[in-house]
Image (cartoon, rainbow, N blue to C red):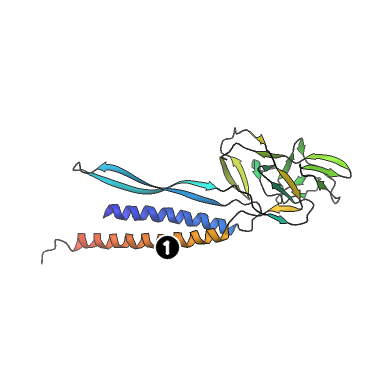
Amino acid sequence: MIQGIYTASTGMTALAQKQEQIANNLANLNTTGFKQSGLFSTAYQNLVKDDNDRVFANRDIKVDEVYVDYSEGSMRHTGGDLDLCIKGTGFFKIIADEGVRYTRNGNFSVDANGILVTDDGAKVMGTEGFIRVEPNEKVTFTEMGEVIQGGYSKGFVKVVDFQKPYEMRRCGNSRFAPVNVEAVELQSQGFLVRQGYVESSNVDMIRNMVQMISAYRNYESSQKALHAQDDTLDKAVNQVGQVR
């Protein structure tokens, strides 16, 4: 009975973590460049011995890994000269206060110094340093990321990639950083930069809603199983063997 309570409780813990991931996905449904995530859960069964040297199965359910779905989101037209979308693989490289970060969020602007920046002021890297343009003058971006203003090239927006499968960690605001600080940047292959577009989140609302309902029902079932085990244990302790 104790094992049954433990198994039900570990299952509820994994389901609660799954609900948190789904809720985070749905909360970022309209966040530019956001990548949805999910969980890998595994049921373990170990054969152990009790104090009387009797073998029994010890079952456990654990969350193995939180994974990120890096598939492309749909392109959303904005018409903004400084809004960029990567069609294909790769990330924009930016310099934030906390260091180098990588993002698919191409909602850019120009600061007071004429440097191309993100919506919160992080500097966008070019292939030869920061991208500087004249504020309030039209800027054109080619499909290869070249920045052209007044008929002159201002450099190329830096689009980098990493070895797949990605080993990246979330850093908030649709940004990532390699888990291994020594990870080597690769030249992204087969990408196009689209001006006037941004990448929507890749959250599949219908699938996440279905998973949320399923996880909730499974959580309820585990909760009922736990209560049943608890009631049985209560009877075994307080009623069985009573002298009447």
Tell me what residue is drawn at x 40 percent, y 56 percent.
12
Tell me what residue is drawn at x 28 percent, y 42 percent.
47
Residue 150 location in percent, x, y? 89, 45
* Crowding at mark 1 (Cα within 10 Å: few <14, some 14-19, many 20+): few
- Considering every residue shown, the one lying at the far bottom of the view is 244
Is residue 164 rendered to the left or right of residue 63? right
Residue 231 location in percent, x, y? 27, 63
Tell me what residue is drawn at x 56 percent, y 40 percent.
167
Q: Secondary structure at mark 1?
A: helix
Task: Place residue 166 in its image quadrant.
Answer: top right
In which quadrant is the N terminus drawn? bottom left
Residue 241 location in percent, x, y? 14, 61
Residue type pointed to by label 1? Arg
- Considering every residue shown, the one lying at the far left of the view is 244
Residue 66 location in percent, x, y? 50, 47
Task: Place residue 97 in its image quadrant.
Answer: top right
- Considering every residue shown, the one lying at the far front of the view is 190
Q: Compare residues 110 and 55 and report the one nearer the observer.
A: 55
In which quadrant is the C terminus drawn? bottom left
How many labels sit on residues? 1
| Image vertical order of residue 124 relative to residue 12, above or below | above
| Image vertical order of residue 28 relative to residue 99, above or below | below
Circle 1 is placed at which residue position?
Answer: 217
Tell me what residue is drawn at x 58 percent, y 57 percent.
204
Is residue 52 rendered to the left or right of residue 110? left
Is residue 8 rendered to the left or right of residue 16? left
